[in-house]
Amino acid sequence: MATSQTLRSTVKLASGDELPVLGFGVWDSPSNLTTKSCLEALKVGYRHIDTAQLYGNEAEVGEAVKQSGLKREDVFITSKIYTPAADGPSTYQKCLDSVKKIVGETGYLDLLLIHNANVGAEPRKKMWLEMEKLHEEGKLKSIGVSNYGVAHLKDLKSYGTKVWPPAVNQLELHPWLQQREVIDYCNKHGIAIEAYCPLVRNQKSDNPTLNAIAKKHDKTTAQVLIRYSVQKGWVPLPKSDNPGRIAQNADVFDFELSKDDMEKLDAQPQEPALVLAVDNESEE
């Protein structure tokens, strides 16, 4: 059954910008493969690439966008900052470095995220205030967070005087980790949800429920998990350096999981996050 959404569908952010409903993750993608993999993703039709300072491949993502021949405004690019520098000005520069590395001196990023709340309250505040400045200057079209719980988001509200709510909260999300409390908070406050590790690092490929649903729809288990995220209203960020899987992971808009399918996946036992400090996964 065809669905109303396509690979080009978007989610409206609090900033007013449009976030594509499916992203391409590059965590753990070797620098010598990142450009090639991103070009493959863009060729297939992805228009949303998610990188980070920590990944060490920001420049390669930028090179792929440049080589693709696509207009800059047609590709949504996200990066993340993990820790601040020594002071405000140097933290500002650290954020700006990502912009320059990916899109050059005169470019902009569509979204910059604070990578992890675990760095502490003062570091989080320092990064956010400098990100707000870059947002005002147009170097960052939207700003957001990753791995933030409800308490972290409430703390941000106390000093995020220029930008509230954050445009995005990026979390590990899949049937076995649904993080319902923070999801409810984000939905209430208009914070878009991105799902990293939507394929559970391939650790649930033998799950009987998942396999039965995949067989019913004549799809792979990975496609079912990505489709699950999309139907939950999350923006999944599957990762692969395999051209066949890159294309397959995008082929999730010609079927729809039933109410019964969704309920069975929702009912999976909840497990702790497998990675707390970093994100995304090697899905090969």
Image (cartoon, rainbow, N blue to C red):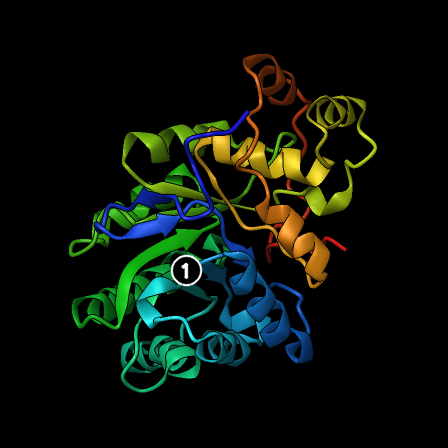
Say which of 184 and 70 sits in front.
70
Residue wearing tag 1 = 114
User: Picture coordinates of residue 46 (x, y %)?
Assistant: 50, 56
Horizontal relation, residue 280 to residue 146: left or right: right
Outermost residue, top direction? Answer: 260
Circle 1: residue type:
Ile
Outermost residue, bottom direction? Answer: 105
Horizontal relation, residue 231 to residue 13: left or right: right
Quarter of the picture containing the N terminus is top right
Say which of 138 and 92 sits in front.
138
Question: Which quadrant of the view contains residue 265?
Answer: top right
Could you tell me which residue is drawn at 22 percent across and 66 percent down? 135
Could you tell me which residue is drawn at 51 percent across and 29 percent down? 2
Q: Is residue 86 visible?
A: no
User: Judging from the image, what secondary structure is the residue with disc 1 in?
Assistant: strand
Could you tell me which residue is drawn at 59 percent across and 15 percent down? 263
User: Picture coordinates of residue 163 (x, y %)?
Assistant: 20, 54
User: Picture coordinates of residue 185 (x, y %)?
Assistant: 36, 31
Q: Compared with residue 74, is residue 233 higher up or lower down, i.e. above or below?
A: above
